[in-house]
Image (spheres, grey):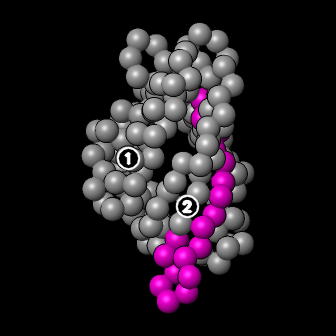
Amino acid sequence: MEEKRIHEFFKRYQDIFRQGLKNEANMEQVASSYATAFIAASPARVMAGQNDEQLKQVMRQGFERYRQLGTKDMTLRGIRIAPIDAHHCLAHVAWTATYDRGAAPDVSIDFDVHYFVQQLDGDPKVFGWVSGDEQALLRQHGIV
């Protein structure tokens, strides 16, 4: 698994997320970032899902929620890759989300997400991720 391809993948992922914040995301492109099935874990829950129409709908709703919260940008700060084997890695990805607070100054929040990535014959695909307590972080910074 080439680290360069993983870095390129997450740069594209950042671009896709930014398009979603503008309500311009191509949902086929969004879905193409994920494997046919995936797992997700946070302090709120652990879930498993399929890369299907429901994923696209959940992603649309997620982008809408971020827009309602005033999220205006999502910036990739860094990536640290831990190889697992020839086809899998754990990518520790550092993000900064910037929120428009209207008359108040923008708020930027740093956070990390840990992605399980698989690369077989084609492009890398996310098959899982672990994130922190997003709601607590948003409350802490006065976003919600």
Callout 2–callout 1 Cβ contact below 8 Å: no
The answer to whether one can see residue 54 in this image is no
Is 33 or 107 nearer to us in this picture? Answer: 107
Residue 139 in percent (x, y) is at 67, 72
* Residue 87 lies in quadrant: top right
Name the quadrant containing residue 88. top right
Quadrant for the N terminus in the image: top right
Rendering coords of residue 142 (x, y %): 65, 78
Which residue is disc 1 drawn over? Answer: 16
Which residue is drawn at the image coordinates 34% and 54% (left, top)?
19
| Left or right of residue 79, residue 54 in this image | left
Amino acid at dot 2: Ala
Highlighted range, magenta:
99-116
Place of residue 82 in the rendered image (x, y in percent of width and height, measured from the top left): 69, 25
- Identify the secondary structure beneath mark 1: helix
Q: Amino acid at mark 1?
A: Ile
Classify mark 2: helix, strand or loop: strand
Residue 78 in view (yes/no): yes
Residue lying furthest bottom in this view? 103
How crowded pointer 2 is (Cα within 10 Å; few <14, some 14-19, many 20+) is rated as: some
Mark closest to the chain's N terminus, 2 or 1? 1
Most common secondary structure along the magenta stretch: strand
Residue positioned 30% across, 44% down in the render: 27
C-alpha gap between disc 2 and disc 1: 14 Å
Which residue position holds label 2? Answer: 97
